[in-house]
Amino acid sequence: MKIEDIPEITFRTHECHYEFLVMPFGLTNTPPTFQDHVQHGDRVLKLLVENQLYVKPSKCFFGAQEVEYLGHIVSHEGVKVEPNKIKTIKEYKIPTILRHLQGFISLTRYYFKFVKNHGKITTLLATLLNKDAFFWTP
C-alpha cells in the first residue's frame, strides 16, 4: 500500500488508533477507493515492458463491471458466490447416513456468509450428529 493512502483508512476506536499498512480486505468500498486510474495502469504496463515482464491477457481485466476472484464474483453490488462453485451443494443427495450429513455440513460451512439463516439451518442439522440422533424422514 502506498504511504499516502494510509491516512484514507486510518480509524480510531475507544482503545487506540489504527493504521493499515497493507490493503485491508473486507472493508466496505475498499476496491473503489484504491482502484488504479487509467494513467496508473498505463504506467504499470510501460514499466512491465521496460523490464521485459509480461502479463497474461486472459487474466487481466480493465473497466470490468464484475470480476471473478477466488470462487467469488466481485462487483459494485458487493461479493457473491460464483454459481459453479455451489453446484455441488445444490446437487448434494439427501444424506442417508451420518457420514454424508457431516460431509454436507462441512461443505456448506465456507459459504455461511452468503446463506440467510445458515446458522439456524445447520444447527438443526447438527443436532442430528448427536449419538443415536440421526434419523432422516421424508
Image: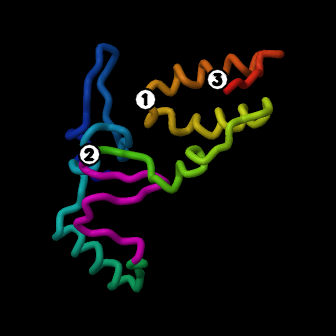
Would you name the residue on which mark 1 appears? 116
Element class at badge 1: loop
Q: Which residue shows up at 55% across the image and 51% down it?
A: 87
Q: Which mark is residue 125?
A: 3
Quadrant occupied by the C terminus: top right
- Could you tell me residue 30's position as x and y percent? 28, 44
Amino acid carrying mark 1 in the image: Lys
Specify which label sits upstream in the sequence, 2 or 1: 2
Would you name the residue on which mark 2 appears? 77
Q: Which residue shows up at 34% across the image and 15% down it?
A: 15
Q: In this view, does 84 lie to the left or right of 88?
A: left
Examine the rendered structure and indicate whether residue 133 appears above or below residue 41: above
- Could you tell me residue 102's position as x and y percent? 72, 32
Considering every residue shown, the one lying at the far front of the view is 138
Element class at badge 2: loop
Amino acid carrying mark 2 in the image: Glu
- Label 2 Cα neighbours within 10 Å, binned few <14 / some 14-19 / many ≥20: few
Q: Distance between the residues labelled 2 and 1?
A: 17 Å
Q: Magenta part of the protein: which range? A: 58-77
Element class at badge 3: helix
Q: Distance between the residues labelled 3 and 2?
A: 31 Å
Query: Which of the two residues, 11 or 59, is positioned nearer the viewer here?
Result: 59
Specify which label sits upstream in the sequence, 1 or 3: 1
- Could you tell me residue 12's position as x and y percent? 26, 23
Q: How many labels does the image show?
A: 3
Examine the rendered structure and indicate whether residue 10 appears above or below residue 82: above
Amino acid carrying mark 3 in the image: Leu
Which dot, 2 or 1, sits closer to the camera?
A: 1
